[in-house]
Amino acid sequence: MDARTAARYSLAGIRLVNGAAALLTPRMMARRLGADPQQPALVYVLRMFGVRTVAIGIQLLCPADAGELDRALRTGTLIHASDALSAACAGRAGLLPCRMARAATAISTVNVVLTLVARRRPSTAG
């Protein structure tokens, strides 16, 4: 397996695990974020995040064609970069506990790197 494929499968796995956790156990995820797990709006948002994350994970595992895979990876780069920036800003503003903001920023940054590796064009050694 080449680095591009390994990055794509790793990213899909991260998305499926995190998405399923947010979708199926939103109150536990809220507690891990340091938020009130009894807030109905937060549970709703976490479930929406979970559905989105599972859907984009599946796109990486089962693309219809190379064009769909390329679009999923390009979109993923944007999504994960905005997630990383949002987490960093939330931590800086005190909206997330510092430890959780750092963890969320780190996870999303790793996801950005994985999308970039998966999108990398194969070299043509000549």
Image (spheres, rainbow, N blue to C red):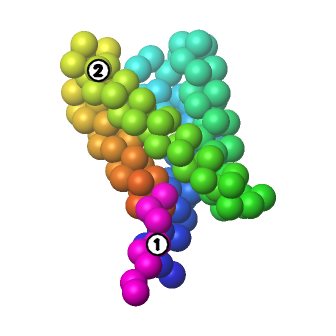
Label 2 Cα crowd, 10 Å radius (few <14 / some 14-19 / many 20+): some
View extreme (right): residue: 64
The residue under label 1 is 122
* Magenta residues, dominant SS class: loop
The residue under label 2 is 89
Residue 75 sits above or below residue 49 on the image: below
View extreme (bottom): residue: 126
The first of marks 1 and 2 along the sequence is 2
Residue 68 sits above or below residue 40 on the image: below
Residue 117 sits above or below residue 71 on the image: below
For the point 51% across and 81% down, which residue is it? 1
For the point 47% across and 36% down, which residue is it? 78
Question: Is residue 20 in view from this perspective?
Answer: no
Q: Quadrant of residue 106?
A: top left
Label 1 Cα crowd, 10 Å radius (few <14 / some 14-19 / many 20+): few
Residue 82 highlighted magenta (yes or no): no
Picture coordinates of residue 34 (x, y %)?
35, 25
Residue 121 highlighted magenta (yes or no): yes
For the point 68% across and 61% down, which residue is it? 66
Helix or strand or loop: what does disc 2 sit on? helix
Bounds of the magenta span? Answer: 119-126
Question: Is residue 56 in view from this perspective?
Answer: yes
Helix or strand or loop: what does disc 1 sit on? loop
Picture coordinates of residue 100 (x, y %)?
30, 32
> Mark 2 belongs to which amino acid?
Cys
Mark sitting on residue 90: none
